[in-house]
């Protein structure tokens, strides 16, 4: 790990930094390929699809949390 000068603002930064903390200039080219792989995009889409296809899961979860919170509020008032 070495210090380099930012091409934009000439601030000393680590060569491992993705961007300059002073001005935001991107140091490393491109996005992380692991974040944009087809598999990861497919996994995110699958999870989002499950939540959109079964909104009753979210409603049930909210209802359970509210019932527990109400019960605890009643007991410990």
Image: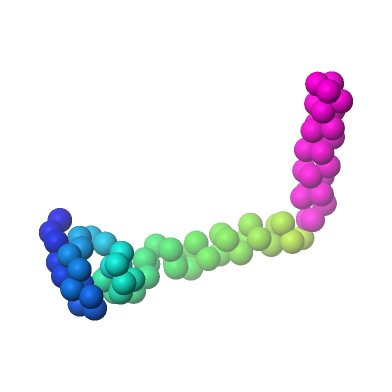
Magenta stretch containing residue 62, yes or no?
yes
Task: Please give the range of residues in magenta.
Answer: 54-77
Q: Specify whether 57 is left or right of 38.
A: right
Q: Specify whether 4 is left or right of 37.
A: left
Identify the residue at image location x=36%, y=66%.
Answer: 32
Position of 48 relative to 65 (above/below): below
Camera-side residue of 13 and 43: 13
Magenta stretch containing residue 23, yes or no?
no
Identify the residue at image location x=37%, y=67%.
Answer: 33
Camera-side residue of 34 and 26: 26
**Picture quarter containing residue 1?**
bottom left
Residue 28 spot, x, y in % from top left:
27, 70
Quadrant, the C terminus: top right
Question: Is residue 49 something one can see in this rendering?
Answer: yes
How is the structure coloured here? rainbow
**Picture quarter containing residue 69?**
top right
- Looking at the rendered structure, the number of numbered marks drawn on it comes to 0
Position of 69 relative to 51 (above/below): above
Residue 67 spot, x, y in % from top left:
84, 35
Residue 31 spot, x, y in % from top left:
37, 70
Identify the residue at image location x=56%, y=59%.
Answer: 43
Residue 70 spot, x, y in % from top left:
84, 32
Q: Main secondary structure of the magenta part?
A: helix
Camera-side residue of 14 and 45: 14
Position of 61 relative to 30 (above/below): above
Q: Specify whether 60 is left or right of 14.
A: right
Identify the residue at image location x=79%, y=56%.
Answer: 55
**Picture quarter containing residue 64?**
top right
């Amino acid at each position: 790990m070495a210090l380099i000068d930012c091409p934009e603002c000439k601030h000393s930064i680590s060569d491992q930094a993705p961007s300059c903390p002073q001005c935001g200039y991107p140091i490393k080219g491109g996005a992380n390929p692991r974040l944009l792989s087809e598999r990861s995009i497919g996994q995110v889409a699958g999870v989002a699809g499950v939540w959109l296809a079964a909104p009753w899961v979210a409603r049930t979860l909210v209802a359970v949390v509210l019932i527990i919170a109400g019960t605890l509020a009643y007991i410990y008032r």
